[in-house]
Amino acid sequence: MWKRGKGARPARRATPLELCDLCAAAFPEDEAVRGYVPDSSAVHPTNDWFDGLRRVTACGDAHFVVLRDTYRRRPFVEEELWAAKITRVLTSGPPVATMEQLGCRTGLYESEIRRAMAWHNEERRQRGQP
């Protein structure tokens, strides 16, 4: 068995840290203020119940209010949410061969899929991406 030297300090447990989404300050996990804010660009990787909601973490109530208000001012664009759902399906699981399969896996109607694709293509064009 190992013995510690005479002046050795006991090993400290690492405290899990969080980062504030507003100021990027590191703080203990148990002091975090968390919540969900509406965001049409956010989709959950596995649970579509959380699609359109972004989980934010703040170092205190004041920063959480700023984050919440920032997301409230951002427009919620349905086509952006639908495009994110389509991207999730196309980048995970088995390949999709038809519009019907895509609709079944995303829960979207064909008209919504087409609107999402048009929105996505317009966003890329505005950003100068091919």
Image (spheres, helix red, strand yellow):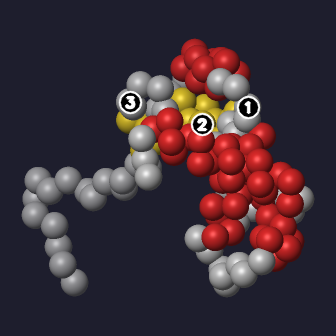
Snapshot quadrant of residue 123: top right
Q: Residue at 51% across / 42% down in the picture?
A: 125
Near mark 1 (Cα within 10 A), the count class, few <14, some 14-19 or many ≥20, is: some
| Residue 64 rendering spot, x and y as whole percentages | 60, 23
CA–CA distance in space, label 3 to label 1: 28 Å
CA–CA distance in space, label 1 to label 2: 17 Å
Q: Kindly indicate whether the residue at mark 3 contacts the one at mark 2 (C-beta within 8 angstroms).
A: no
Q: Residue at 22% across / 84% down in the picture?
A: 1
Question: Between disc 1 and disc 2, whose residue precedes?
Answer: 2
For badge 1, the amino acid type reads Phe
Decide if residue 42 is in sight here: no
Residue identifier under label 1: 76
| Residue 113 rendering spot, x and y as whole percentages | 78, 56
In the image, 127 versus 15, the foreground residue is 127
Question: Between disc 2 and disc 3, whose residue precedes?
Answer: 3
Q: Which mark is residue 56?
A: 2
Mark 3, mark 1: which one is toward the viewer? 1
58 up-or-down from 122: above or below: above
Residue identifier under label 3: 25
